Amino acid sequence: MTDPKTLLSANPWWNAAPATQAWLQGVEQMQAFWSASLPAPPAADRRFAAEAWQRDPRFAQLSQGYLQFSALMRNALQAAPLDTRSKSQWDFALRQVLDAMSPANCLATNPEALQAALDSGGASLVEGARLLMADIAKGRVSMSDDQAFEVGENVATSPGSVVYENELMQLVQYAPSTARVHKRPLVIVPPCINKFYILDLQPDNSLVAYAVAQGHTVFLVSWRNVGAAQGHLGWDDYVEQGVLQAIAVAREISGADQVNTLGFCIGGTLLGSALAVAAARGEQPAASVTLLTAMLDFSNTGELGLMVDEAMVAQREASIGRGGLMKGRELATVFAALRANDLIWPYVVNGYLKGKAPPAFDLLYWNGDDTNLPGPMYCWYLRNTYLENKLREPGGTVQCGVPVDLSSITAPAFVYASREDHIVPWQTAYAGTGLLGGEVRFVLGASGHIAGVINPPEKKKRNHWVGDLADDAGAWLDRAESVDGSWWPAWSDWLATHAGAKVAARRAPGNTAYPAIEPAPGRYVKTKAA
């Protein structure tokens, strides 16, 4: 079979037959294709890095064969005559299948799990079964020890008070940690997908605590983890009753003419929409705008965008567009699938096959704290951003009764993106710089969507790039300068120039019109998704 010409030369009649010649030509072409397509021996893969995979030649062959097969399938897909979007969609689906097929994910083909079972006398399998049943009851794969953290006790612990609440959000005012503060406060709009305490995990990695320590009075929107009673709320409600209301309350409490604003991820999209609505009404309530890994232009939405098409959006609109909930568990599953070999399979293998409970990790605890979204709000967001990219067009959307134009936002802006972000591609975040009407500064950080943002200076980790704006993202990066360490100090220095003079810090939260309701972090953030 490896040398068909020699095999057939024993029978001259057969060898001379036209059909045989055609078959031989096809075999030669297939051999040439196989030789060109077969990848080189794959590089080390952390799934098979343990000595057990190399010590036994059977498992070594199994892992190497799987890696070569995976590479061959990906190469074949790249050679397929498909348009770019279709090829990307199939590539995502293929990756899910190949990741699931890994021999590391099966007890019978994982030498580490088999050895653990032998060493423990089967106890690891019993514990793995217990962990599996516990996760089935939860409806998700556990990535952290859920009992190790409690919101308000050892995460989200920055002192402060809730000074306003409505059906959709609570507004938290944090207590000052300096004798004097800037006159203009900072209003933070976190994502409503997941909870705000990603910005206040622990005292040593809290962006909230850092901003307070720099002399800013910080107000933060704590979105409600909505239930059936809020299932009718739409995008306009998040803009009007969420962002604009928070800005209005912060201005009244502080007595400032304007506030500094910060939006993270979809919180940045909401903030941009809200400030454009205010501008259409003849108002400019923001002295500055900070956008962290946020999209205003949805031209390239990465792998998330591959899942959004007209049929998908129409189906969502029919099912929950007029009322209902987009369940947080479903959203979390989609995000985990983008990085299945980081956020799904390691926990399956270590937990169910090896009987090792996940360790306590604040970031992954936060990641598993799901949040629901109202159906009408979610459907408006999908159609007008991911599907039709209307937000970038002046007057392309009507929000809160007025046409929205992002260029009407004249406040200076600090736009941050993360270079390895798989949710908000950094080039897409950069594209948003051309939509705003004020002076814009762009900073690119190392790492991903969360780790790039939550990078306190004291850790002395990673780097970031700075530079003047260019015609496109590639040109900007070519000329950008790499700077060691966190981007937080650069942002803090920039923010201080827009924060106004220093005044004596007021120790009492709120004011007569907005008295303190309860201590931070408040009730809303503690509500679990039902």
Image: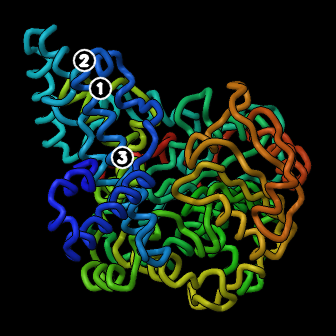
The quarter of the image holding the C terminus is bottom left
Considering the numbered disc 3 on the image, is that residue within a helix, a strand or a loop?
helix
Measured Cα–Cα span from mark 1 to mark 3: 23 Å
Instruction: From the viewer's perspective, tell me whether residue 408 is left or right of residue 393.
Output: right
Name the residue beneath numbered marker 3: 340
Residue 439 occupies quadrant: bottom right
- Name the foreground residue: 164 vs 230: 230
Name the residue beneath numbered marker 1: 60
Contact, CB < 8 Å: mark 2 with mark 1? yes
The answer to whether residue 372 of the structure is visible from this angle is no
- Name the foreground residue: 17 vs 195: 17
Considering the numbered disc 2 on the image, is that residue within a helix, a strand or a loop?
loop
Q: Residue at x 33, y 34 (%)?
A: 64
Residue type at numbered disc 2: Asp
In the depicted structure, whether residue 442 falls above or below residue 459: below
Contact, CB < 8 Å: mark 2 with mark 3? no
- Name the foreground residue: 224 vs 475: 475
Which of disc 3 and disc 1 is earlier in sequence?
1
Measured Cα–Cα span from mark 2 to mark 3: 27 Å
Name the disc covering residue 56, or none: 2
